[in-house]
Image: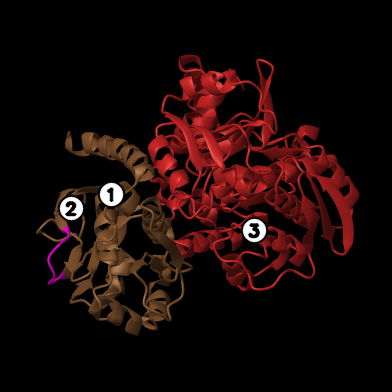
Amino acid sequence: MRSNSLATPADARPPAPARGPVARARTAAAILIGRAVGVATQVRRAGSGTAFPGLVASKVSPTLLAETLRSFPDGLVVVTGSSGKSTTTKMLASVLEAHGKNVFSNSSTANITQGIMSAVLNEVDFAGRMSADIAVLEIDEGHASKLAPQLEARTVVLTNVMIDQIDRFSDPHHLTRMLGNIGHRATTHVVTNADDAYLEELAPSFGVDVLRFGVSEAVMETAPHGLGNLRTSPSRLRSGTIVESSEGLSASIAHDGELVHVELPARGVHYAIDAAAAIAAASSVLGSAFDLELAASVISGIPPVFGRGETVTIKGKRIEFVLVQNPSSFQLNVDQIDGPQEQVLVAMGSDVRDPSYLWPVDTSALGTVTIVSGSGAEELALQLIYRGVSIGRIEKDLGRALDEFLALPDPTTGVKTIIFSADSMRRTRAHWGLR
Amino acid sequence: MSLSILALRPDLLNVNGDAENARVLAVRAGWAGIDARIVHDVSELPTAVVIGSGYDGDAAATVEAIREHRDLLVDCIANDIPVLAIAMGLELLGSRIEIAAGEWIDGLKLIEGESALVPTRMHGDLVVESEFGTLVGFENHTRSWIGSDPALGEVIFGHGNATPERVEGLVHGSVIGTHIRGPVLARNPVLADHILRRATGGMYTERGADAHSADRIAETSRAKTLTTRIGR
C-alpha cells in the first residue's frame, strides 16, 4: 500500500491504531489543547496544576490515555497496591533502563488518571505515540481499578493491601476487589506479594502465571509488629523472589535460587520487599535477558526516595525525614528507628482527615517526642501520650516548630528526626526551600 | 485492686483504633494510681469491656466469632460491668444486622434493636449532647440503629443512629453504645471517667495530673471541631 511505502524510519514502531481522520484529529487536538493548558497553568501558578492539563485533554479525547498506553512496543507494566508503589516503580524502571530499555514512567505525584495523562502529554507525538519502548506506571489503586477495563498490561505488580485513609478505602475486601480488577488485565504475569493473605486469595483467579515475592521466615521473625499487611499469609514463600535477610540499609534477596546483595534507598524491610517486587517484575518483562547481578547493582545505586528515610542538611544540621502515609508505614518506620532518639519532631497535617486509624500503632518505642506539630497536632499528641510517649511541647505552627527544632543544639546521640504526613512533608520542604 | 480491661478480639474489632479505648481506660486508671492492665482473656469476668468495630466485608464472620463470647457478655451485663460497644460492636449486640441489601444475619440478641443499611456511608464529625456533657468524635458507619433503649444523647451535628429522632447511641444498663469511632474515650474523658467510676465502684475519684494535661490537649482538639461544626 502506498502509505506503507512512504513510511519513514521514525515510523518503524507499531502504527497508531487504525482510525478515521476525525478520530486522529481529535487525538491531535486533545494533545495540543492539553499541552497548551499545561503551559498556561504553569505560567499562572508555578508548581501547581499537574493534573489539570490531563483533565482537559481527556475531555477532548476520552480514549486518548488508553490508546497511548496500548501503543508501547514492549507494552505496559502497572504497579499498584496500598504502599510501596513509588519505590517499586522507580527500582523497576531503573533496572529496565540498565537492560537497555527506553522507559516511560511517572512520579507518585502523577499516579491518578489525570496526572498520568498530563505526564503522557509531555511526551506523546501528535499521532498519539510515545518514543519509549515500555511504560512502567504506578497507578493509584482506585484509579487503576477504574481504568482497568480500558487497559492491557503485560505485567501487573500488586504490592499489598493496607489501610489507607479511612474515609477512602475503609474495607479491605473492596480494596482487594479493586486490585483484582487490574490484575485481571495482565497478559503475561501478575507479580504479587505472597505474604499478603488478601492478595494470595486473589492469586488463583488470575488467568496468567503468578510470580511471587515475599520474605523468609527469619526476616518475618525480626519484624516486631509484622510487615504491615492487614492479614499475613500463614506460611512463607519457598520459591520465587525472597528477601532472605534485611538489616538497616542492606538486604539479600534470592531470585529463583540465586542470591544477591542489595543496598536499599532507606532503612527498612519494606524497601527490601519493594526491591524483591522490582526484581520479580523485571524478570517477568525481560525473560531470559534478565541479569540479576545487574538488577542488584542498579537497585543499590538508587538515591533515597523523596522524603522517605532521606537525610538532609539544613544550615549545617543533619536531619532525617521519615514519611508516614498510613498506620502500616508508621509502625514499620517506628520499628526501624534505632532506639529512642533524643530529638524527634512529629507533624501531621490536614491530609489525615481522622487520625483514629493511627491509634493501633505502637509508638512507645519513640520514648520522647520533642515537638508535636501540624494542624492535627493535638490528636497525634493524644495517641503518643496514651502510648506512654512523653511530649516536650505542642506547636501547631509547623514553620515555627521547624525553626525551633533546627535551632536546638545537635543531639549528643542519634540524629534529629522528623516524622511527618505527606502534607506536613510538603510544607517542611517548602519552609526550607528543598525541592 | 487491679483492673482488667478486656479488649474483645482486637484482631477483628480494632478498625480505626476502636479497641484502643481499653488502653485509654487502663492508662487513665494508672494515672490515678490504680493498677490496671489490658486483657484479651475471655475466660474470666473483667472490670470493663471494650467491643470495637470490624470491617464491613467481614461482618458475618466477625459476628459469628463474637457469638462464642455471648455467655461472657451476658454475665458482664448481669453483673453491671461496664461495656463500651462501638459501631459494629454495638450492632452485633442487637437482634439482627443487615449485611447486604435485604440480607440479614442474627445479632447476639443481648439488646433489643436492629441495624439496617443506609444508602450512603456516614462518615464525618459527630457531635452529641449527652448526660455526660458534649461528646465529640468521628463517625464512620453504614447502618442505622433502631432500638428501644434510651439514647446516649442528641445529635447536634452528624448522623448518629440515623433515625428521624436525631439521637445517637444507647444506654442499656452498664452498656454504652456509640458510633463515635476510634479513641472516643481519649477525646471525651468525661465518658472514660464515668466508665472507670462505675467499674471501680467509686474507687476512681481523682483523675491524676497526667490526665489533666492529656485532657487539656483533648479539649483544644474538641474545641476546634465544635467551632467548625456548630460555631461554638
Q: Report which residue position mark 3 lands on.
A: A224
Q: Residue A359: give x, y in percent of width and height.
A: 45, 52
In the image, A9: left or right of A226?
right
Extreme-left residue of the structure: B165
Helix, strand, or loop for circle 3? strand
Residue at mark 3 to residue at mark 2: CA–CA distance: 39 Å
Q: Nearer the viewer, residue A25 or A123?
A: A123
- Amino acid residing under circle 3: Pro
Helix, strand, or loop for circle 1? loop
Quarter of the rendering containing residue B89? bottom left
- What color was chain B assigned in the picture? brown
Q: Nearer the viewer, residue A36 or A190?
A: A190
Quarter of the rendering containing residue B98? bottom left
In the image, B72: left or right of A3?
left
The residue depicted at 37 percent of the width and 56 percent of the height is B29
Q: Chain of mark 3?
A: A
Q: Residue A92: in sight, yes or no?
A: yes
Q: Report which residue position mark 2 lands on.
A: B132
